[in-house]
């Protein structure tokens, strides 16, 4: 498990030296995680999305020094040792939410009771299957994403959809709605919360998010 933690450190260290939107949150996690602490061994839990999609996502990583390839390689070596889970949502939240839950897996690496203990951050991996729409949602937590493998489309607030790929980073201010859509490839990402770790994820409905799934590929990023 140590190579996986080392690869995370490399990803966050590179971001902390950048000028991107995730620079501040990357510095925060570097300063608030005991990187040399003992690692916990979770009870391994598999997930069908991981078995079906992780190899493809990890095979489609950036090779331009972002650290994504090293992180994907470390994950392939350790993914069967991790506790993967579905994002459980009430079925009455809509058929799009039901479809999403069936095609999405998440595991926590940093946080209370996680592989590397921390009471200041939550972080781990998400894996979104191909042709899967994550409806608009929001939470009080400040959030950063690193796209590790695969690609997709992303929307933050009421801004237009834009394409993301391995090596890209995304930052969400607290309470700002955001949504994700995959296409032919799955999308493997690192997620990081650096505030309000007990936040609930709320599905957002209504304008301008009523029919955004149909707008993918139509709107252009500013």
Image: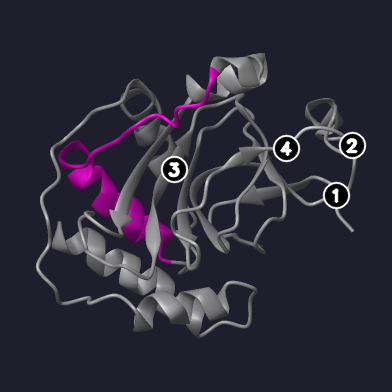
Residue under label 1:
158
For label 4, the residue is 204
Q: Which residues are magenta?
A: 67-90
Mark nearest the camera among 2 and 3 is: 2
Quarter of the image holding residue 209?
top right
Distance, label 2 to label 1, CA atoms, is 9 Å
Determine which of the numbered discs, if any, sits on residue 126 in the image.
3
Q: Where residue 148 appears, x then y in whole percent?
A: 47, 52
Could you tell me which residue is drawn at 29 percent across and 35 percent down?
A: 84
Q: Kindly identify the residue that appears in the image at 89 percent across and 35 percent down.
A: 218
Give the percent coordinates (x, y) of residue 25.
51, 74
- The secondary element bearing badge 4 is classed as loop
Q: CA distance from mark 4 to mark 1?
A: 12 Å
Q: In the structure shown, which secondary structural element does the residue marked by tag 3 occupy?
A: strand
Spatial separation of the CA atoms under disc 3 and disc 1:
23 Å
Identify the element where label 1 is drawn: loop
């Amino acid at each position: 498990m140590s190579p996986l933690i080392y690869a995370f450190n490399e990803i966050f260290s590179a971001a902390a030296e950048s000028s991107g939107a995730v620079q501040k949150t990357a510095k925060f996690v570097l300063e608030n995680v005991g990187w040399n602490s003992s690692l916990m061994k979770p009870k391994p839990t598999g997930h069908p999305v991981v078995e079906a999609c992780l190899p493809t996502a990890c095979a489609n990583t950036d090779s331009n020094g972002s650290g994504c390839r090293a992180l994907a390689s470390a994950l392939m070596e350790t993914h069967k040792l991790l506790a993967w889970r579905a994002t459980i949502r009430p079925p009455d939240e809509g058929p799009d939410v039901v479809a999403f839950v069936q095609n999405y897996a998440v595991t926590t690496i940093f946080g209370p009771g996680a592989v590397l203990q921390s009471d200041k951050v939550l972080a781990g991996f998400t894996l979104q299957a191909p042709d899967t729409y994550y409806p608009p949602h929001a939470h009080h937590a400040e959030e950063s994403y690193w796209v590790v493998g695969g690609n997709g489309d992303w929307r933050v607030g009421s801004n237009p959809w834009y394409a993301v790929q391995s090596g890209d980073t995304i930052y969400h201010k607290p309470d700002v709605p955001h949504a994700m859509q995959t296409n032919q490839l799955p999308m493997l990402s690192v997620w990081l919360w650096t505030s309000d770790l007990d936040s609930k994820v709320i599905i957002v409905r209504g304008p301008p998010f009523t029919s955004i799934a149909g707008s993918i590929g139509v709107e252009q990023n500013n």
